[in-house]
Amino acid sequence: MNKIFRGIDWLMLFLYLFIALFGIANIYSVDSSSGTKQLIWLLISLTLGTSTFLVRPKFFENFAGLFYILGLFLLAGVLFFGSYVNGAKAWYRIGGFSLQPVELAKISTALMLANYIDSPNFNIKNNQSLAISFLIIFIPIVLILLQPDVGSILVFIAYFIALYREGMTGWLFVIGFYFLLLFLVSIWIPSWIIILILASFIIAFLFIFRKKIRWNQQINILFIIIFLSISSLVSICSPFIFENLPKHQKERILVLYEGERKYRDTAGYNLLYSKTAIGSGGFWGKGYKQGSVTAGKFVPEQQTDYIFCTVGEEWGFVGCTILICLYTCLIARIYYLAETQKSAFSRVMGYSLASILFMHFLINIGMVIGLFPTVGIPLPFFSYGGSSLLGFSLFIFIFLRLNYSDRNRLI
């Protein structure tokens, strides 16, 4: 019996269960009916997760392509047969049951990416291998963009962290961050000023380092022209794209610049009362089910994306710190286990899981406290939602199974 349980990472399993149960308690505080449903979803997730744990690891590798195609099929199908929720056509509704296919697509994309990286033909330094890896990630992103579900698109950045671990250059992150920053800045600053600043910076850089760098004049001139052209295009298109966003999405971005009070009757309403709830909790909190903002239901759908403000109001700074530490420990534990895996498949699955959890955790708490626009990203295992809990639970149990096999291989 001891041999059967040997190799299960109990710390990872404990952290997952503790966060999920703590989440159910907070959901129940907001809405008892939702709390009961979430408990049922947890039991379903544990049942399916346990069944997943009994599957041989080779099953996930052999059928990764099939799962990936199924995930794409579900993402494409929701565009025709899905239902709109908060402006995005991202849900299947069958009777009283709802399913968000992107939660399953996160797993299938990770499986496909891990399977490809583990193949003998993969070489991260080869442009063809890198292009295929990008294609695996971008196909579901395009389908999600058509819904459109901006939050889930941001989460898919997590797969590039896994690619970085496998040897992808970190300059791609720098370039991506640069163009994102340029897009946001160009909303407020005229494009001609930005282009002039960029051109001046490049000229100054070339002049200062002209003796330290070996320049190929033709290549450098071509690079500068391409860089300025792309930057100019982003800068010019940014205000146009922003002005054509739906009103509620535009206001969510403006809230970051102009404050939630200006938009207290629209996009800033949730954030205003979320901050009020967190701030009113003080150091120790008001106590379980004693929060006035939560009891008054001032935050719409508080049990979903804004559940963290319930923690702040009822459990205070201490409760928020404990929850953040729990997530930090869980994510760090998965990264650690991923790094110890013997196969690239298991390692990429671990890095994908940890990175997706990190992105969800970072974006959700950031938007609840006003550091990130509201984009509809749940707090993993904690926010109310059967699809999210089931998807993340299956991901957890798949990696637990891969790690179990890896550990027993060494015994």
Image: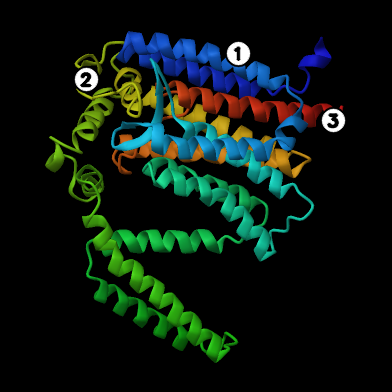
In x, y percent, where is residue 327? 50, 30
Quarter of the view holding residue 353: top right
Q: Secondary structure at mark 2?
A: helix
Does 83 sit above or below residue 155?
above
Counting the numbered discs, the total is 3
Dot placed on the residue nearer the N-terminal end, 3 or 1: 1
Local crowd at mark 3 within 10 Å, few (<14), some, or many (≥20)? Answer: few
Dot placed on the residue nearer the N-terminal end, 1 or 2: 1
Q: Which residue is mark 1?
A: 47
Residue drawn at 71 percent across, 38 percent down: 346
Q: CA distance from mark 3 to mark 1?
A: 26 Å
Local crowd at mark 2 within 10 Å, few (<14), some, or many (≥20)? Answer: many
Of the two numbered discs 2 and 3 in the rendering, the one whose residue sits closer to the viewer: 3
In x, y percent, where is residue 165? 65, 51
Q: Label for residue 293?
A: 2
Quarter of the view holding residue 341: top right
In x, y percent, where is residue 107? 58, 35
Q: Amino acid at mark 1?
A: Thr
Q: Which residue is mark 3?
A: 409
Dot placed on the residue nearer the N-terminal end, 2 or 3: 2
In x, y percent, where is residue 105? 53, 36
